[in-house]
């Protein structure tokens, strides 16, 4: 049978491009086809507010891209990528004007924690020491771990809920809230199993690498990847929404950077009814309400360290963060939602005109919720940075439906391609020895709905490509 391509990749998100690069690097003839007018999926930068301001529409802070074992090997700096390192990775402010900050230095971080200093070091030092071994087992499909003992030790800390872990390790309310700030990225209630895994991994990223981001916006990472892909002969086409396999050129394999719901809607896939049934049971998680601002001055955080941090976690006590995430899970909103905020322009003067600034933030909302959360988010920021609202020149908001229009993979506002609870953490999209393969031997799934899940790291695409290479090309 004559094929025009060895592999066609549908969708040019970070995972689609990563899969394409890994296949092309191994000598395959590949094509990426994208429905939008530009590449990147949720990793894109636009002038959402006023001319001269650059806002990351989706992902904004990229420690996982910086640390990704796959992306690290591509020397993207020689394709124009520049990393910006904020002075402090992330800060967590409190109502009394104090804050705890996470530095890329364990001791400097633990020195702020009083009675909890030793416990914080006991929790993180072994994980930092063994991270290079651990990351290979954690950033891929569940299998026989390469380093079983280290994997087991990580599992004991990562499988409990963030609530259990913090109550076991820490005495102080503020240390617990500080850990919750990273754990709540999971979009899980703090008493749900495995919520601590997100707090651990994201804190390790900060303690080891800082939380950097690309100079000029998230799109710059994608531009560097596309430049690399083209330099090795890869082809990419835009403005084509794939609805059926039959409309694509003939290819030995097809890799979909889509979530299960969308993949099931593609015609001509000839999936078995059992596979379709199991994929239909895939669960999506809460949504987000996303905001961007053009500001006439930097955010006036009460706490000086918050002014030096790239990311701020706003949830002023453990109770507030617990309530916020618990209610979202129950389909309701808390009036003081946990807010993730990034302030790129403090460290990257290409983001806004001289002396002006940008801010990026979101809060979690119930799945599919389209209510406007502007007031709740801005009120939360005002509590830790009085005077913030007076600095606003323009704002942009995106509810769940608007996010889905921006990128069809954001189902119901879910930014992680599916719920990341214990039942789906390692078994995305279904429990299967190779989660990237489908019931059709020529079709694969490579999006963040596969292990290791959401985030800009490209490891889902890399592992899917490895599976294609092994199954079809004996590499
Ligand atoms: C608001 C928001 C904030 C986030 N913050 C961060 C962060 O700070 N740090 C971080 O690491 N991660 C963050 N994330 C998560 C991260 O962006 C995603 O996990 C990641 O981008 C997923 O990449 P992907 O390649 O799997 O899919 P996507 O980026 O969703 O790409 C899928 C691509 O497929 C295309 N497509 C879909 N259907 C079709 C079709 N039928 N035909 C052709 N093309 C199609 C889409 O247009 C898109 O380009 C955030 C996401 C959002 C939305």
Image (cartoon, grey):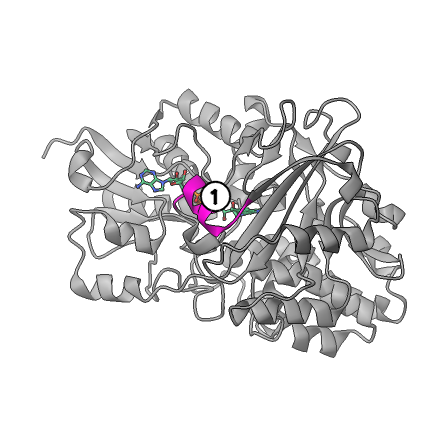
- In the rendered picture of this protein, how many numbered marks are placed on residues? 1
* Rendering coords of residue 132 (x, y %): 61, 52
Q: x, y percentage for residue 472?
A: 23, 44
Q: Is residue 404 magenta?
A: yes
Asked where in the image residue 261 lies, by quadrant, the reply is: bottom left
Image point (79%, 44%), residue name? 388
Residue drawn 25% across the image and 54% down it = 264
Q: Secondary structure at mark 1?
A: loop
Q: Is residue 399 left or right of residue 299?
A: left
Magenta region: which residues? 398-408
Q: Is residue 124 visible?
A: yes
* Quarter containing the N terminus: top left
- Apparent side of residue 156 relative to residue 421 in the rendered image (left or right): right
In this figure, which residue is indicated by the disc labeled 1? 458
Which secondary structure is most common in the magenta stretch? helix
Q: Nearer the viewer, residue 222 or 48?
A: 48
Dot 1 alpha-carbon crowd within 10 angstroms: few under 14, some 14 to 19, many 20 or more = many
Q: Within 8 Å: ligand 1 and the Cβ of disc 1?
A: yes
């Amino acid at each position: 049978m004559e094929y025009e391509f060895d592999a066609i990749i549908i969708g040019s998100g970070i995972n689609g491009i990563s899969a394409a690069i890994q296949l092309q690097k191994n000598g395959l003839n590949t094509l990426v086809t994208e429905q939008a007018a530009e590449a990147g999926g949720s990793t894109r930068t636009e002038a959402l507010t006023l001319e001269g301001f650059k806002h990351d529409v989706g992902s904004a802070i990229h420690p996982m891209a910086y640390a990704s074992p796959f992306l690290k090997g591509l020397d993207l700096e020689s394709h124009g990528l520049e990393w910006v390192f904020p002075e402090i990775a992330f800060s967590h402010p409190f109502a009394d004007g104090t804050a705890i900050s996470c530095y890329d230095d364990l001791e400097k971080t633990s020195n702020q924690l009083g009675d909890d200093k030793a416990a914080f070091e006991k929790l993180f030092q072994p994980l930092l020491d063994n991270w290079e071994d651990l990351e290979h087992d954690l950033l891929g499909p569940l299998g026989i771990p390469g380093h079983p003992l280290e994997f087991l030790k990580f599992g004991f800390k990562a499988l409990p809920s963030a609530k259990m872990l913090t109550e076991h390790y820490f005495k102080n309310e503020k240390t617990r809230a500080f850990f919750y700030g990273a754990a709540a990225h999971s979009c899980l209630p703090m008493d749900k199993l495995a919520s601590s895994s997100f707090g651990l991994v994201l804190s390790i990223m900060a303690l080891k690498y800082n939380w950097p981001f690309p100079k000029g916006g998230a799109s710059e990472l994608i531009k560097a990847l596309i430049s690399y892909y083209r330099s090795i002969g890869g082809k990419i086409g835009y403005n084509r929404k794939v609805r059926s396999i039959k409309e694509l050129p003939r290819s030995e394999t097809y890799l979909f950077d889509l979530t299960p719901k969308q993949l099931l809607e593609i015609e001509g896939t000839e999936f078995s009814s059992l596979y379709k049934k199991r994929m239909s049971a895939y669960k999506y998680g809460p949504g987000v309400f996303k905001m961007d601002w053009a500001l006439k001055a930097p955010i006036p955080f009460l706490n000086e360290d918050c002014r030096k941090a790239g990311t701020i976690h706003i949830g002023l006590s453990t109770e507030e963060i617990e309530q916020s995430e618990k209610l979202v899970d129950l389909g309701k909103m808390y009036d003081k939602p946990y807010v993730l905020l990034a302030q790129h322009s403090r460290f990257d003067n290409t983001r806004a005109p001289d002396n002006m600034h940008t801010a990026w933030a979101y809060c979690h909302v119930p799945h599919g919720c389209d209510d406007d959360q502007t007031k709740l988010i801005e009120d939360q920021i005002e509590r830790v940075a009085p005077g913030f609202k007076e600095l606003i020149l323009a704002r942009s908001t995106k509810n769940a439906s608007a996010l889905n229009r921006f990128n069809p993979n954001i189902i119901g506002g879910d930014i992680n391609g599916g719920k990341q609870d214990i039942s789906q953490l390692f078994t995305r999209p279904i429990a299967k020895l190779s989660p990237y393969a489908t019931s059709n031997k020529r079709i694969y799934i490579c999006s963040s709905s596969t292990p290791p899940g959401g985030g800009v790291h490209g490891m889902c695409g890399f592992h899917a490509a490895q599976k294609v290479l092994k199954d079809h090309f004996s590499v």
